[in-house]
Image (cartoon, rainbow, N blue to C red):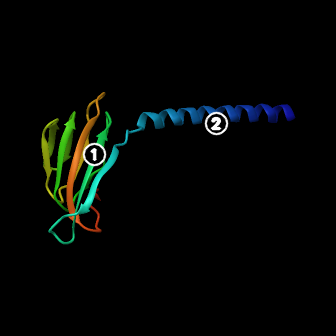
Amino acid sequence: MNTTKLGLGLVLAGALSLGTAFSQDAQAAEYKPKAVVKSLVEVPLAGVDGKTVIIKHFTLPAGFVGGKHFHPGPVFVYVLEGTLTVETDSGTLKVSAGEVYQEIPRMVMRATNISASEPVKIVVFQVGETGKPMMIKAK
């Protein structure tokens, strides 16, 4: 009887280990790389009460897919390297290195890097109300 319990325990342990391995492989296949963000500036906008300027540098790895969101204030994106793909309800726009993209306030969008091998590097300039979110998640 103890041999039966030991055998059953070994079979169960093996099945759990195999299930965990398959689960980890499935999770790895679903992994989406995350953006690397470096804050460069966050200061009050001189001469304009209640407004803040934020400037950030983003590196979007190959295959990056951002979340849908919008900005309540003006945003300007300068592409340093690669090609940024911007998806909106109005269509898809590609912005290449050396180009500037101006986002329309409150327009829902998603930034992606469709390259399979190269990162996209951008600098984002945005203005918003001091103390309020500069980016809002959308459905």
| Figure check: 20 above or below 53 | above
Q: Give the percent coordinates (x, y) of residue 20.
A: 58, 36
Of the 4 image quadrants, the one containing the N terminus is: top right
Residue with the mark numbered 1: 57
Of the 4 image quadrants, the one containing the C terminus is: bottom left
Q: Is residue 26 left or right of 123 when viewed as pictured?
A: right
Residue with the mark numbered 2: 16
Q: Residue at x 18, y 61 (%)?
A: 73
Local SS, label 2 = helix
Local SS, label 1 = strand
- Amino acid marked by disc 1: His
Q: Residue at x 30, y 27 (%)?
A: 117
Task: Check whether the beta carbons of the residues at disc 1 and disc 2 lie within 8 A of each other.
Answer: no
Regarding residue 1, the answer to whether it shows in the image is no
Q: Is residue 107 left or right of 19 when viewed as pictured?
A: left
Of the image marks 1 and 2, the number of the one nearer the N terminus: 2
Q: Give the percent coordinates (x, y) of residue 33.
A: 37, 39
Give the camera-side residue of 130 and 66.
130
- Give the quarter of the image for residue 100: top left
Give the camera-side residue of 87 and 79.
79
Density class for disc 2 (Cα within 10 Å; few <14, some 14-19, many ≥20) is: few
- Give the quarter of the image for residue 50: bottom left
